[in-house]
Image (cartoon, coloured by chain):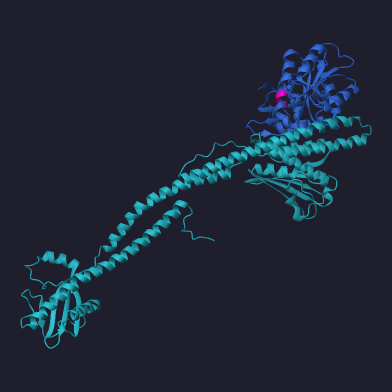
Amino acid sequence: MRRPSLWPRSLAGQMALLVAIALFVAQAINFGLLLRERSQLRFEQIVTPTVTRLVDAADRINSGGTADTGHGHVRLVPANPIAADRIRRGSVEKAIAQSLSQAGLATDAVIASVRPIASDDWPPSRYGRRRAARLSHFRSILDVAVHMPGRGWLVLRAFWPNSDPFLIWRLIAQTLILYAVVLIPVLWIGRRISRPLKSLADAAHRFAPGDDHEPLAETGPPDVREVTAAFNALRLRVIAMLDEKDRMLGAIGHDLRTPLAALRVRIESVDDDTDRARMADIIDEMNRTLDDILSLARLGRPSEPPVDVDLSALVDAVVEDFRDLDHDVTFEDGQRLPIRLRPALMRRAVRNLIENAVKYGESATVRIEPEPSRVRIVISDNGPGIPSDRLTDVFDPFTRLETSRNRETGGIGLGLALARAIVNDAGGIIRLENRTGGGLDAIIELPR
Amino acid sequence: MAIDEPMAENPHLLLVDDERSIREPLAKYLEKQGFRVTQAGDAGAARTRLAAYAIDLVVLDIMMPGEDGLSLTRHIRETSDLPVILLTARSEETDRIVGLEMGADDYVVKPFSPRELAARIKVVLRRAASGNRQVAPESGSFGFAGWVLKTGERALVDREGVSVPLSTGEYNLLLALVQRPRQVLTRDQLLDLTQGREAGAFDRAIDNQVSRLRKKIEADARNPELIKTVWGGGYTLAAEVTRL
């Protein structure tokens, strides 16, 4: 599944993003609750005293007094003074009507509306003009008119707090501070975990038997340290196993080579020249296979350092060795082509490919195709080729092809496997291709 | 010692190998080839035989239990000029180089053809008798005209440090030339010096290899400055050679 590109790839990034999202949701819920609580509080702070004052005024009127207590806050007027086009506060009206009926005050109409503070709401003496102006930022006036059937309208003014205009900014600031306080440690922890994991992954990718790197430093939290320690131990076990394998193959090689050498000496007493030559060939063949096995086994731990080599001269030298043995191998000497590799091993790889070409295709034509970023060595023969579905199988050790190719020798053996291992070790690729028109191309492609 | 005297009718070989299965048939074969052969199963026995007989040449297995062939080679070199041919396995490449640097004359790789060994023995004996012996033929490096021939790794390295691989024949020819700078070497001499390394017919082989070597090391292969042709003679390396 492809994730959107905004999704961070690193552990620390993902942790930080998740925490940020969670924080934001929590803040939003908090904010909602806060708003609700504030409006409820406002409601109670205003509706309850308003109802009390209305009930007091009604009591006074019913007992023959006047609505006003002298402060001029509650008045009895004959007609509804609140203009019909003003926006009414339904929730306030409903709450007041309910409270009034609970207090036993009969009414058939409650009208409530909020407006900005006007200059004539209070005499200047009471609030200074400047203070009144500042007050108008935070407060408005709630006008309430209650119809008392048969008596007229009870009218009342009260302060009505404005909703806080800075609330949203306060919330944003609060969120940002939270982010800073929480996300910085999260990022730090994330990096502390992910950095050792990254070097662990790098070390695992890099790991090649043979190079004696220092064990990976155990850093980070204990869990991560444990993983690193386990990797280090695993690495040591792998190296020990490979060492063991090399030792064993070395012992096998030596133990097989000695009887082979003894046999090679003894066949000299065979009188029939043809017989003797054939026996010598078989012993040579066995010895080559033994060499290949040992080389393949040791390839992961090469003793030869890579040096700058003229690839053209290298191929030429191999070809020349074949020509000295009267094999039909041609090579068009190209330009100087310095490249960094292990020369003895690469000679071996090229030699194995030419050997196959000579063995199955009678002759070989070798050419080098240099390109800016890579170079190809192409070895062409005129043999029967290989069935296209087996072209990659033959690189596996001891592959057998049920065709004319293996009739005499019983298998391709290790030559191609060794060549592939050498070329891969040099960072290149190796492949076989059937040419249209017949013949096989073996291609080594190396980076320059 | 024996090598300063005229070669005996039947050269006396000391064959040192811990493997009886190789040593005994090999001794029998070499005796058939006209050598007198004394056998030794380990380095201690070899030392005793060396003291007891007038040995002309030692054939020595490198890998032996106890004191190995390298140590014995060192011992032989410290006390005499006796020619030594090493028997090695391919996997003992470093041992082989060390052995040659210690002064062994030649080596064969197991499993070897007894005929080839016999041929090598004859070549080494002939060189020893004629005084044309190369002491430590493959040791060290030779510098000439900006090139370095490293004998340990069998590599030719140019001015810029780029290694130029040589075929076996080219390498042997170049080695013979750099070991005798400014000497005229006939085709026959060159054949003798490079032979034994490989089979094959050598009619034009030297000329071919010279022209191939020229292509690799001369600035202009048509006007060679380094490997010069001597009329009626052969070839010579016209350059200062320094041992590195």
Question: Image quadrant for the N terminus of chain A?
Answer: bottom right
Point out residue B118 in the picture as x, y percentages from the top left corner. Answer: 85, 24
Residue found 18% across the figure and 82% down from its top: A83
Taken as a whole, is the magenta stretch helix, strand or loop? helix
**Can residue A278 be seen here?**
yes
Work out which residue is located at the far bottom of the displayed protein and give it.
Answer: A150
Q: Is residue B40 magenta?
A: no
Image position of A193 (left or right of B180): left
Q: Is residue B99 magenta?
A: yes
Indicate whether A409 appears above or below B110. Answer: below
Point out residue A408 in the picture as x, y percentages from the top left corner. Answer: 85, 45
Chain B is shown in which shade? Answer: blue
**Can residue B222 be seen here?**
no
Q: Nearer the viewer, residue A45 or A421?
A: A45
In the picture, one chain is cyan; tell me its letter. Answer: A
Indicate whether B141 appears above or below B222. Answer: above
Indicate whether A105 appears above or below A262. Answer: below
Q: Nearer the viewer, residue A48 or A275?
A: A48
Point out residue B39 in the picture as x, y percentages from the top left corner. Answer: 83, 20
* Image-quadrant location for residue A422: top right
Q: Nearer the viewer, residue A351 or A80?
A: A80
Image position of A209 (left or right of B172): left
Residue found 80% across the figure and 33% down from its top: B208
Work out which residue is located at the far right of the displayed protein and give it.
Answer: A272
Q: How many marks?
A: 0
Point out residue A364 in the picture as x, y percentages from the top left corner. Answer: 79, 44
Q: Nearer the viewer, residue A443 or B210?
A: A443
Image position of A343 (left or right of A360): left
Magenta residues?
Answer: B96-100
